[in-house]
Amino acid sequence: MRRTFSASPLEPIAYYPQRDGKAKVWLRENIASTKDDEGETWEADEVSFETRLSLAQVEANFDDLWVQAETDAQPESVRIAELQEQITALTNVLLFDEGSAANE
């Protein structure tokens, strides 16, 4: 996720179909405008990706696509570290459950 700024109003979804059947998509949250002496500026949190989904599918799956785009943008080392933490947590749950079942 990154913060984006624009002199024009920002929409929650920018969807641009491409000739290859894919679409370039920008999803935006926390859209806000500010006014100063130079005019109005728009800003938002933004993720972007390419997809073969239709605009209707993107609209229907906004939240899931946002999470996926954030995950895809993370460096591989961060994703690996998160997976290792999840494996450790699952292992602890399994070991704890086995230990409590053995005590019954």
Image (cartoon, grey):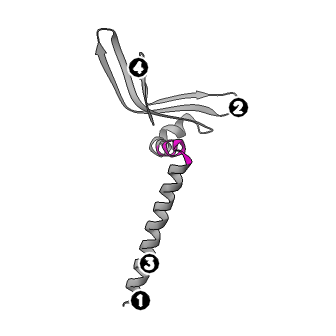
Q: Which residues are magenta?
A: 67-76
The answer for how far apart the CA atoms under marks 2 and 1 are is 58 Å
Q: Nearer the viewer, mark 3 or mark 2?
A: 3
The answer for how far apart the CA atoms under marks 3 and 2 are is 50 Å
Q: Nearer the viewer, mark 3 or mark 4?
A: 3
The one nearer the camera, 4 or 26, is: 4
Dominant secondary structure, magenta: helix
Q: Position of residue 1 (x, y in %)?
A: 45, 37
Residue type (three-letter) at the residue carrying disc 4: Pro
Q: Earlier in the sequence, mark 2 or mark 4?
A: 4
For the point 48% across and 37% down, which residue is it? 59
Whether residue 15 sits left or right of residue 52 in the image: it is left
Q: Secondary structure at mark 2?
A: loop
Q: Residues within 10 Å of mark 2 (few under 14, many from 20)?
A: few
Q: Earlier in the sequence, mark 4 or mark 1?
A: 4
- Quadrant for residue 31, please give it: top left
Question: Where does label 4 land, which residue?
Answer: 9
Whether residue 87 sits left or right of residue 17 in the image: it is left
Residue type (three-letter) at the residue carrying disc 1: Ala
Q: Earlier in the sequence, mark 3 or mark 2?
A: 2
Residue type (three-letter) at the residue carrying disc 2: Asp
Question: Where does label 2 land, which residue?
Answer: 20
Question: Where does label 3 land, which residue?
Answer: 95
Q: Nearer the viewer, mark 2 or mark 1?
A: 1
Question: Where does label 1 land, which residue?
Answer: 102
Q: Secondary structure at mark 3?
A: helix
The quadrant of the rendering that contains the C terminus is: bottom left
